[in-house]
Amino acid sequence: MAVPSSPPQFLRAKKLSDNQVELSWQPPREANSEILYYIVRVWNLSSEFIANITVTSVVVSVDGPGRYNASVTSWTRLGDGGILIYITFSTSESVPSDPPQNVSYSDLSTRTVRLSWRPPAEPNGVIQFYTIFYSDNITLSTQQVPGSVQWAVLAGLRAGQEYRVWLSSSTSLGDGGVGSTPLNFTTLEDGQSPHTDGAGQQLCTAFPSSFIPPVPKKITLKH
């Protein structure tokens, strides 16, 4: 049994609002003993937050927009070994540093697909909306959904057509020019139907009866 010989890993700060930040991290690679708790410290020139945390994330209240410091140490029965991880972060809103994550799709019909995704890891603010770009190499269409939503339905597609889709996320200051890795998919051919289960029942996704897909914008690509 010994003190940790390496600090916690991958400390990140994610802004939730003007007054709240979520800190997250991973355990040290060389803990050398059972981690009893983490000591989290967040401070600036006018305030300080210190807490013992037994999990690897915590939501911290801060004074408001500005720059802050954060550190995390991991404690065993013998102490923390004086080793910590340290970052600085800003709660002033900016553009996202990375795009939406884990973009995937599922077929609903020959002319309709459902997209889903996860928010960017570093939004640097509150996501106001997502923009979906999709193209059949002739026409580029766009569709926007609110930042609180992480799925969308693309309707009016052509059966048996290959499409490419990618997304961006925007705070009040823009999308930062970063988009997700393009995802290629082909819609079902006429006569095909979405997958069925072992009993021959069609699998489908239920949507609220009030849901009306936004009308996409279309741009003709010039070669």
Image: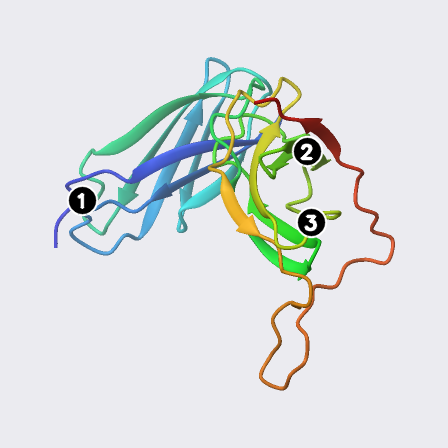
Visible residue check, residue 102? no
Q: Is mark 3 on a helix, strand or loop?
A: loop
First along the sequence among labels 2 and 1: 1
Three-letter code for the amino acid on which mark 3 is drawn: Arg
Q: Which mark is residue 108?
A: none
Residue shown at 87% from the left, 53% from the top: 210
Q: What element carries label 2?
A: strand
Measured as percent of width and height from the top left, residue 166 is found at 55, 37
Mark 1 — residue? 4
In the image, residue 33 above or below residue 67: below
First along the sequence among labels 2 and 3: 2
Residue shown at 19% from the left, 54% from the top: 33
Please state which of the two labelled residues, at mark 3 or mark 1, is closer to the viewer.
Answer: 3
Split into 4 quadrants, where in the image is the C terminus? top right
Three-letter code for the amino acid on which mark 2 is drawn: Ser
Q: How is the image coloured?
A: rainbow
